[in-house]
Amino acid sequence: MPKNQYPTTDLTAELKKRRRVGFANADPSVEANDCIKVYIVSSKEQVDTSDAFCIEPVDLNNFFDDDGKIHGYKGLKINIWISSVSFHSYADVTFESKSDVSVTQVNGLVEIGGKGITDLKSNLQKFLADTIVENKDEFLQTFSKESGFIGSIVSNGEILNKKTSDGLTDDPDLEVVRLIVGSDAAGHLYSRVIPLVLLLIDGSSPIDVDDPQWELYLLIQKQKNQQGDTQRRLLGFTAMYRFYHYPDSTRLRLSQILVFPPYQNKGHGTYLVEALSNVAISDNVYDLTVEEPLDDFQRVRTCVDLKKLLAFDPIKKYIQSAVLSLKHGKLSKKTHIPRFVPPVTASEDVRKNLKINKKQFHQCWEILIYLGLDPEGQGMEDYLTVIANRVKADILGEDSETAGKQVIEVPSEYSPEMSFVMFKSKSGESSTTVQVDEKTQTNQEEQLKELIDERINEIKLIAQKVSQKNQV
């Protein structure tokens, strides 16, 4: 709306005119994150109560234009309720008043203008999509009318028997169900969980529900209701894509995995990852990969893979050899410290039998060696040196100490403490065109040390988790 300017003396008259058409002072804007709360509820009784599970933190600004700003509302409050029974949603919107007019005084002049009133419905639909139920009473009725929604979906899928290492079913109340995307059931379910995908999986976008190469794996919990009937609840899911691998095999790539917030930190993520690993083995795919894994997921994945690797006899001799080399090698006295990577034959055996890809196996390999050493005993100092050299080589290259590579810090508004460029002079000679002062060199060394410390701490944390599970 264009801005009009009035002398200060005319302000009173102008405001009187606007009161006749319902003028009200409005907050100029409010961020979506500051006025919207998202809740997951399992019954109609939880709606509007403290028993509802609030999802936080969650970034809602991305779904609103103008950097997440909502304009034209005073005292705006939006509570979004998502049913864990049918995955319908309802948005309860309240505000004191709304107006597309704002009043400001600049250099003695009063500016009357505004940015319009944000269309809440269209912006909420950006992430709630077709799950929105506009009438609250209709939303509350979905808890009874669609109580069998997940059960009907499961009836169209394949129930996978998840086994433990001793051959027994791990939890009789949990099951993993596979749905091939392209079927009505898979498309119907995925359309309902899209809001949680967009809210909880960083950088995610919906999968193509018409592409049969996609597969959904549902983590289901069976429960008895008051009438004694078995009902099924969806705790989480993963979306996998099946690629062709020449000449006669396939590869599985995990693209999305989500355990819904009320069920997290209870071992359900581990259960689902173990089931996926078993699928890769039973289907005899080429290997299992993960698309841009986050740190928390990578930790769970590595623990699951280590459990299988520790019981895999063909690689035990290679682990023992690496451990002995560290205990007796005196690496600190050598001019060139080797990288303890697994033999090619070991990597291939692991891929063929456990479907763990090479990159992931190398990550696990460092932890397998750590588990074979005494944290306070001989070989640990050399082990830490090997890890430090490997991290440094990954950043600067294999010949970082002799090839004339240098890291130069550059200013960045995104991440100043981690911003740098790397260059390599010709023939490995030191560069004369870029001067590196002592302060810059010190900062580079500190950054490398932080990365090395992060990796070593991660190794120790995962090793501790694996050791505790093996002792149970």
Image: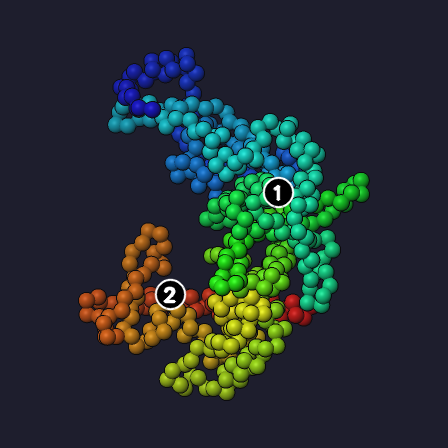
Q: Is residue 378 visible from the viewing direction of this image?
A: no
Which element carries disc 1, helix, strand or loop? helix
Q: Which residue is mark 1?
A: 185
What's under tag 1, amino acid-wise? Ala
> Disc 2 residue type?
Gln
Q: Is residue 192 left or right of residue 205?
A: right
Determine the residue located farthest toward the left in the rendered image. 433
The residue located at (67%, 39%) in the rendering is 149
Q: Nearer the viewer, residue 335 or 166?
A: 166
Percent x, y of residue 298: 52, 61
Q: Position of residue 271 (x, y in %)?
A: 64, 58
Residue 177 can be seen, yes or no: yes
Left or right: where does residue 16 sit relative to residue 81?
left
**In which quadrant of the rendered image does the N terminus lie?**
top left
Residue under pointer 2: 447
**241 lies above or below 149:** below
Answer with the quarter of the image where residue 448 lies: bottom left
Q: Residue at x 36, y 26 (%)?
A: 114
**Disc 1 and disc 2: Cα gap in Å?**
50 Å
